[in-house]
Image (tube, rainbow, N blue to C red):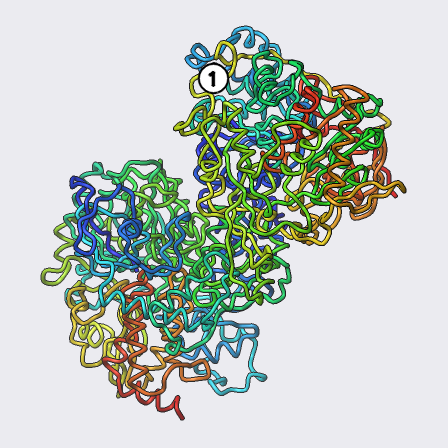
Amino acid sequence: MSNPLADMEKPDVIFAIGTNMTECHPVAATRLKKALRRGATMIVADPRRIPLAEIADIYLPLRVGTDVALLLGMAHVIEREGLCDRAFIEARTEDAEAFFEHVRQFTPEWAETICGVPAADIERAALLYGRAERGAIYYTLGITEHICGVDNVQSLCNLALMTGNIGREGTGINPMRGQNNIQGAGDAGGLPNNFPGFLPVTDPDNARRFSELYGREIEPVKGITKVRALELAAEGKLHAMIIAGENTLVSDPDRAHCQHALENLDHLVVIDIFLTETAELADVVLPASAWAETDGVFTNTERRIQRVRAAVPAQGQAKPEWWIVAQIGQRMGAPGFEWHSAQDVFDELCSVSPIYAGVDWEKAGTGKYHWPVPEQGHPGTPRLHEDEFPSPSGKGKFMRVGYRDPAEVVSEQFPVWLTTGRRLQHYHTRTMTGRAGMHFFVPQEVLEVHPDDVARWGLTDGGKCRMVGSRGAVELRVEATDRSPRGTVFCSFSFGDVPVNVLTGAGYDPVTETAELKVCPVRLEPV
Amino acid sequence: MPTPTDDELIQRWRSEPAPLLPLLHAFHDRDGHLTDDALRAVAKGLRMPLADLFGTVTFYHHFARTPPGQRAPRVCDGPVCRLRGCDALLRALPDATPMPCAGRCDAPIPVLRGAELLVGTTAGGAFGAQGDERGWPPPEAFLRLEPSPLPPPYPGAAGDGSGECVFAEIRTPGRATLAGYRATGGYEALTAARSPSEIIDVITQSGLAGRGGAGFPTGRKWQAVADAPGDPKTIVCNADEGEPGCFKDRALMDHDPHALIEGMAIAARATGATRGFIYLRYEYPDTMVILERAIAEAKTAGLLDGFALCVRRGAGAYVCGEETSLLNSLEGKHPFPRNRPPYPVTHGYEDKPTVVNNVETLCAVAPILRHGATWYRTLGLGDHAGTKVISLSGDVVRPGNYEVPIGLPLRTLLDEWAGGPGPGRSVQAVTMAGLSGGLLGAERLDVTLDEPCLRSHGSFLGAGGIMVFDDTRDMVAVAHEAMAFFAHESCGKCFPCRIGTQRLSERLSPGPGGSGPTELDPWTTEVVDIGDAMKATSACGLGTAAPLITDSLLKYFPEQVARHLAARKA
Amino acid sequence: MNQPIQTPAPSTLAAVMEMDGQEVSFTPGETIYEVSQRMGRQVPTLCYDDRLDPFGGCRLCVVEVEGLRNPVASCTTKATPGMKVHTKTPTLERHRKTLLELVVSENPKATIDPLRGSASQELVQLRTRYGVTGERFAGHHSGQSRTDDANPFILRDYDQCISCYRCVRVCAEQEGDYAISVRGRGFETKITTEFDGLLQDSACTFCGQCVQTCPTGALADRKAMRAQADPEPIAATRSVCPYCGVGCSVDLLSKGDKLVGIRPARDGGANLGALCVKGQFAFDFVQHEDRLRTPLVRGDDGTLRPASWDEALDRAAAGFAKALHDHGRHSTYAIASGRAPHESAYAIQKLIRATSGTNYVDNCSRA
């Protein structure tokens, strides 16, 4: 997030797109609701009539995967109506004129033909955001899990740059991170393109420095993403893999491919707290101590660095993950794995990461620091981009993006859009919530289908249906609900008996290699 | 006319000002009660949380959630109607339930049934209090439609009506129509070319003060709203005459509706307000018709240009007579009183500057502007300015509304104007301010009707309801009914009132509902402690006034309290 | 019933007032109660939660203001320049005791298990402080516990309810769910939901905020209450919720070696005392019987069998060493967890970089 969570109570116009926030980030959503209570207005764009849509002032029910078209239409209106923040554009951005020229061709009427949102509503939304004193954008995986995820994000950045809604209190571009420490995993260097602290691996200075620190020459070449790694594994070109705390088999797209890839490895080591579907494929399974048994650090979606602490002893022989990995490192004869505590590991991270240079174990314990914290004594950075953007010129660059269809589109054979996501009471593949009484709320997965479509496809409310895609099929119960629009259905990927990711996986964003989990053409058959 | 659908009702009201209450009434009138589906439709249509709506609906006495609901008779069991046999009427009418004082204490017992207000009595028939219900005739035999009574002829010394302000022309035939109102000088004050500051000056100089009971100077209130930043400004007429024993506003609205409308239009001009509401109590359905007809006439005549005036009907909640509860109710919120400051003059309806005035106050405005500030001031006796309408009821020969000069001796009103308690009887006690001012015993009937005098005796004039109890009445029973009323009407927001009214009521109860000590000393200590805490800490006037009942009971009728406890013990 | 408008104090004076004879400056907009807290006065209250709009329901916080006939609720009254306030006079203390006696006359239970919720001891503590025995003001009780609501998370023990509306207000003002409402009025006031139904049939999302603000334990944490009979003392350990990326601060409640409950941290920077249903109630997985308790290695028969740490770690290391040896540096890969702490991700990226010299590491953010 460019802005802290506290800023969520301060916008006068909220634009939430591709985020089912009340279910996926419920506590963040409470802050938006406080802004609404204070008189803010909200635009919600989502294919589904999610709870946030019910409290929106303008709801834009776009077709799945057409965010770029909607956002181009909005940019067109903002430019046409002269709602651009000229002073901001002049001082803080580049390539504005070319962008304005670009958007002049994309009228709301054009956008309507693609995204299905009435042009008049696109106009209203654009005027509202364009006239905002403090306009803030919030998004989640509904924006990024597309083959055009980067284009989607850049389209949102364009809106913020046009209107100067960034770098100030109550504004910003605010992606909500989905997992408790997904931000921290990146901060700590769990990325193929960056060392800890987001230092590019291709910078020879960085490569040299980490080679020295780690006692092994590290090639200044980008690694591969998980997506590519699974492809290589499937092709027999990758031989050993270690997976920490992820049920890859269930959470990743195209399950059949994933299973084949993991089984094709010579050596798979899984560290987890449960024997997950993924762990069952491993050669070695190492029991980790769980949350509430482990000391460590998490960084949240607003880059706030916070400590977690052990309250109870680990179950059985379970050990902290850092200890397990360090043992493997030592047994492979690598230097630098002689840590005695989580503090040792974290303090080493702080010593190598420029954005953590000003924090340490003790300071993380206060929970008050948002990175970057570039040196000791620095108060942290709750709000990014107040003075400059992280580009070579320090300016925000307008990007001319165009609309592309999803990797697969509906056809006679697969006439229905499937989109997937989470539900409030469950989390990911239910390794945790499935063992915590949450079945009280949601005992099984259901497919949310518009009542008209239930009739159209010969289904029955509460009955079973078979959902077929080009890569596989699953069976699950049908719930007739107008939360789903006509022509689009929804289910979560949380339930092992409805492995919906056997269907997904048609394509990946070319830049980030993020899978298009939000769009998948299917057909529905009664069972 | 076909029955309107949910959607049609919502479309009809959703864009109107203060839409919740009229929309709920529309469903209530259509179905006879508010179904779950109706509430879902309203919540969705007005975009309000369903749980809030459910809670708010259950707050009001008259919103029914189950059949027969609104179709069943509701019989007034206020203090005066109890004296007149409401219990027999309740037994005589199938499905009948009691309702708190419905504001017709000068007429037969009021009964609400469907959208109608009827009056009825079993007195004089073959069905006395002990009668056999099975052989009783159908309800129509003792229920009838009847317009509310006019005030009795002015009995004051002058005899020519010159002592009256708001009642001076009310008895003139045709006064309730626009033509009749104009024929007696109506709308002259509104159409006279006066600037806002001139209007406020005259009202200020006249000494007119809030006739709903608070007594705040009207001119000062208007000036505060005129000066307050924020638009649009609003004039709200408090016509939620919920105080038991008060029925003066009903008489004014039924027989002189244009006087109120003119007063509101003048207030709007004086303050710059562009919208107005008359918040009318639920129990006055005929008055609703009269007001809406009169507003339509005035609108057509171009008298209300720039001032959007409408009537909103309450749904049965005494606390909505408290001005901030009233504003919450208008806005569709839970009708709890608001915390003050800020006051309505700066943060009223929709948090914008708002005048809230009582009906009687507003009705006095046009006469004052026509006859001048001095004329009004001198209507009062001695140092007191102006007049006050007293709703007099109970054990007197001629109950009714009397406009008295402020400062009039109570004895004059009781004995000379109203004919006294009747042959062979003496007055044992009167209530003041309806019930809120507590009781005055026989030895205190020498008071004059003005706030300084009454406050010096621990009471107050308030809205001007006086109920008379002769020497045959059980004053502990009267006090218990009064306290049960307050407990029934306590909104439940603040602890002292919510629990205190209940505990006091239990201590006054003669029957199985009673609790508390049966020895006089501990009983008295408990009652006094509760009352003191309520008076000192309650959040609004309901909780601070209710203990005046027990205070005055202990002061004037200690031997009746002792008898009550002796009976409880036995 | 209208009350006269009070003339506001002249605003020309400096923002200084007097509290119990002591001069104190204040920030315009501050309430008397807030000033009293800064001054260390222990003004009692039951309906106050500093995150909520001032309500003025319990009236325990009334104070005397010189020049005003009646005491005012300090939580709803703003400090004004020159105001002279008394927070603890014999009269006030007498009224406060009466009010508490009235409350207790409805809520006779003298002890409440602290596992019920963060604020559950507030009434019990005031009872003790004012020496309220519960002997006076006997009468009817208005509370009706919802024994029919068998949800395993939130106990609705309304026999303990004092109608302070903190649950109603926290649900509306903090959570924004507007699930809790109040039915009826006066003494018959009942805390409820739409149509008096069960919580799971209402707009309730089981975030637990009502439980944590309830001053009597009428709304209570049923999961934590499972450990009521355990004899060990309750320990609280500050941590962060393990679910989404918001990073809500929590206190982990434990008795001995057992994790018994979760409390939202009021001073948590990300959540300010809020949680969702997962953060509040979904913690049983930690000590679930399905937990992996020993290392496992795949045996010659193809199935996973328990092994010692030494054996398992040697196997793990050997497999990577062999791959590197046989197939070169681009043959090994690591996926870091987005769920485990930094130290896990840091260690695992270092493992790959330090043993293979490649950047063959990723985390689970792409799916």
Q: Is residue B524 above or below residue B268?
A: below
Point out the residue furthest to the right here.
C301
Q: Which amino acid type is marked by label 1?
A: Leu
Residue at image coords 43%, 65%: C186
Residue A126 shows up from this direction: yes
The picture quadrant where one finds residue B415 is bottom left
Task: Tell me the residue that label 1 is attached to.
Answer: A83
Q: Chain of mark 1?
A: A
Q: Is residue B479 left or right of residue A287?
A: left
Q: Is residue A443 left or right of residue A19?
A: right
Residue A282 appears at what percent x and percent y? 79, 37
Which of the 4 image quarters holds residue B153?
bottom left
For the point 58% across and 10% down, the residue is: A104
Q: Position of residue C332 (x, y in %)?
A: 75, 25
Q: Quadrant of residue B545?
A: bottom left
**Most extreme residue toward the bottom, as rendered?**
B570
Give left or right: position of A12 versus C11.
right
Q: Residues within 10 Å of mark 1 (few under 14, many from 20)?
A: some
Q: Is residue B119 above or below residue A457?
A: below
Q: Which quarter of the rendered picture does the C terminus of chain C lie within?
A: top right
Tell which of B205 and A263 is nearer to you. Answer: A263
Where in the figure is residue C266, as x and y percent of width and height?
Answer: 45, 47
Residue occupying image coordinates x 23% and y 43%: B224
**Can residue B116 be seen in this snapshot?**
no
Where is residue C72? Give x, y as percent.
27, 57
| Residue closest to the eye, A164 or B154 | A164
